[in-house]
Amino acid sequence: MPMNESSYTGRSWRGRAAQGGNARETAYQILRDGIIHLRFKPGEALSDKQLAEELSMSRTPVREALILLASANMVVLRPQVGTFVAPIDVQRMEMEQFARCAVEKEILRLCCERPDADLAWRYEENLRGFSHYAAMKTPDLRRLLELDNAFHRIAFTAVGREADYFHMMEGLQHVERMRVLSNLGMAQDETYADHCAVSRAVLARDTAAALGHLEVHLNRYRDNLRLLEEKFPAYFSLG
């Protein structure tokens, strides 16, 4: 029987560890998620005292979480001034996307070489869900990102490398922020078409075509970046 689509969300292993009661990891995940999904905007002040109250925990794990986020350029720590949400770091985003592309191409190559009877319905279910949410007049940004990530996770699952998927996703900070902006400000026709092309090639076990379509798909962000910088300048600079 097909698994429920919710089993293919982009939840990271940090998030799963946090469920065990690690306050720092819980705070990190909640704040990271809030920045990625636009709850917290670039330049917005983050008070560890206020956040600790909202999260019902002490200030120490919140401060530690903010330090972790600062190491990824997700927040800016200014001594004696405060902590602020950082803009999208384009250089970091380039690094993240380069590493992601290398990992995903290798996983997709393995996927083409190892037939999996479940692949067809997994791709079909995902594409149907993505098409449904992309067609909404008011897009559900979180669900679109989950389904987008879920599509890419399918190949990792098929070759028994889900741990690699979680590891890869943990390194995507600024890429994920830009993808949410893309879902907000752009039509998703190209993303859907790319996913269809990749899945058809994988199911046909056409490795060259699958890798070619994936490379085109993962590099569309270059054109999207220019458009998004024009449409949402505040997300790329603190001014």
Image (tube, rainbow, N blue to C red):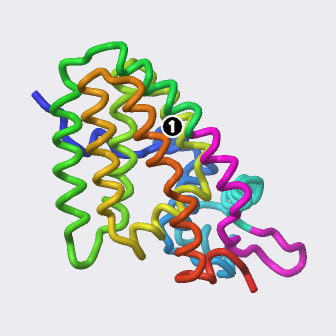
Q: Which residue is mark 1?
A: 13
Q: Is residue 88 magenta?
A: yes
Q: Quadrant of the C terminus?
A: bottom right
Q: Is residue 80 left or right of residue 108?
A: right
Residue drawn at point x = 42 percent, y = 26 percent: 208
Residue furthest out toward the left: 1
Residue furthest out toward the top: 114
Q: Which is nearer the eye, 113 or 178? A: 113
Residue drawn at point x = 79 percent, y = 78 percent: 82
Residue type indicated by callout 1: Trp
Q: Residues within 10 Å of mark 1 (few under 14, many from 20)?
A: some
Coordinates of residue 101 in the picture (x, y in percent): 56, 39
Q: Is residue 230 magenta?
A: no
Q: Which is nearer the eye, 57 or 8? A: 8
Q: Which is nearer the eye, 88 or 37? A: 88
Residue drawn at point x = 26 percent, y = 44 percent: 196
Coordinates of residue 195 in the picture (x, y in percent): 32, 45
Q: Tell me which segment is drawn in magenta.
A: 76-100
Q: Is residue 3 above or below residue 26?
A: above
Residue furthest out toward the right: 80
Q: Is residue 208 above or below residue 82?
A: above
SS at badge 1: helix
Coordinates of residue 107 in the picture (x, y in percent): 46, 25
Q: Is residue 70 left or right of residue 202?
A: right
